[in-house]
Amino acid sequence: MKKLIQTLKNIWAIDELRAKITVTLILVLVYRFGSHITLPGINPNLLDTNKLNSSDKGLLGLFNTFAGGAFTQASIFALGIMPYISASIFMQLMTILVPQLQKIQKEGESGRKKINQWTRYLTVIVTAFQASAYIAYLTNPQGGYAQAIMLDTGLFTFTTIVTLSAGTLFVMWLGERIQDKGLGNGTSIIIMVGILARLPQSLVQEFNIKQQKSGGGLIIFLIEIAVLVAIILGLIILVQGVRKIPVNYAKQIIGNRQFGGARQFLPVKVNSAGVMPIIFAQAIMFLPTLVSFTNVSDSAKGGIARIFNDHSNGWYMLIYSVMVIGFTFLYTALIFNPKQIGEDLKRNNGFIPGVKPGQPTADYIGAIMDRITLPGAILLAIVGIMPGFAQKLGVSQGFSTFFGGTSLLIMVGVILDTLQQIETYLLMRQYDGLMSSGRVQGRQTTMPSSTI
């Protein structure tokens, strides 16, 4: 406890770090305050909370989790930062697949500014489409919002599209300010705060459920907490796990000085794809639910909806796991180029002991990447279906989302990145780090800061 207090004092004693933490906290509070402001034209006192709680599942539940509960509250930040995330992911994939965009990205700062500007334009378009879909969801008579809308349909549609678009752009601006003036990883912190905002409520609900006669009591609740802690520890190992490939550099003598000759390591991550395979798999898994809006028979609709809306369904978990493993290999192949690494090593007089430079080096690195990607993909699939297993074992739906999946991956990754940045400031000022046993390591993700 004494060391913790001293560490906090050291953090607060660094002027630059103190300013960054203060700015980040203020901007996060602004975001959370805006999440509770209802859209113009909706009377919050007339919302049917029973229907809203029952609709918080599947795709809607995922949106609501990332938006910190603003989605079901019909807030001005109901869409959150997700349109910007979708646009950023699309642009990143395009820079990998389209050679012209690759050239622009390699132009340095000017190229990155162009791509960021195009991402913002695309965000506006995505937000407009999602806002239109959200309006259809609000005006659905079977939902809990229709009776609370006080404006006529045309005026409500126009004001809501404008308000939601402005809200998403404002949240995007908050993320950029946290990136520039705060602790960094602005978009990731916005998402993490939205996810963590639902943790206290879910924790209290789970505790109350376990106190009921058939709930299992306090012992079961404590066991669930212990299992959650164990899952988080395992996820930290998965996020930080690397395979170090030894690399030697040839000695060069220039004048009276010797350069090179040192032995270094090329770290290859077990989970190079990060959270992206889970996001892609979830997006594909939500598509079959569109059958409920077609002319398919009611029995078929019910079967499809039951499989793809129930995360604890055995078929859902099997299909979902296969898709996560497949997307892990696909995305890793897109972002990891062994041939380029082999050429860079050869250009810098580096070589792997026992392996010839050039193509043999690329083949060797590619073979290692394939071997470690498989266990990483399997572990990632297990993480993705852990909420389903938690529901099967009696955990409530809201609390089960913290036992794995996208939410937990983002939380662990962002917290590790933030702690790493704070520790870097401490070590630069010759203070002790946050841990006495070693350095805190972040995700070292290949994703740009704008996309988680």
Image: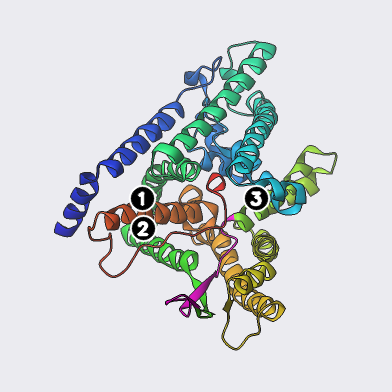
237 vs 152: above or below: below
Q: Secondary structure at mark 1?
A: helix
Q: Mark 1–mark 2 contact, CB under 8 Å?
A: yes
* Badge nearest the viewer, 1 or 3: 3
Quadrant occupied by the N terminus: bottom left
Q: Earlier in the sequence, mark 1 or mark 2?
A: 1
Bounds of the magenta segment: 253-275
In the rendering, which numbered label is found on residue 106? 3
Residue at far left of view? 2
Q: With 296 as the anchor, is 49 left or right in this view? A: left
Question: Residue beneath label 1, please?
Answer: 207
Q: For the residue marked with disc 3, what is the amino acid?
A: Lys
Q: Which residue is mark 2?
A: 221
Q: Nearer the viewer, residue 365 or 65?
A: 365
Which of 78 and 311 lies nearest the eye of the viewer? Answer: 78
Residue 196 x/y as whole percent: 42, 45
Task: Report, in whole angstroms, how far the alpha carbon at label 1 lies from the one at label 3.
Answer: 52 Å
What residue sits 56% from the left and 18% below the top? 148
Display coloring = rainbow
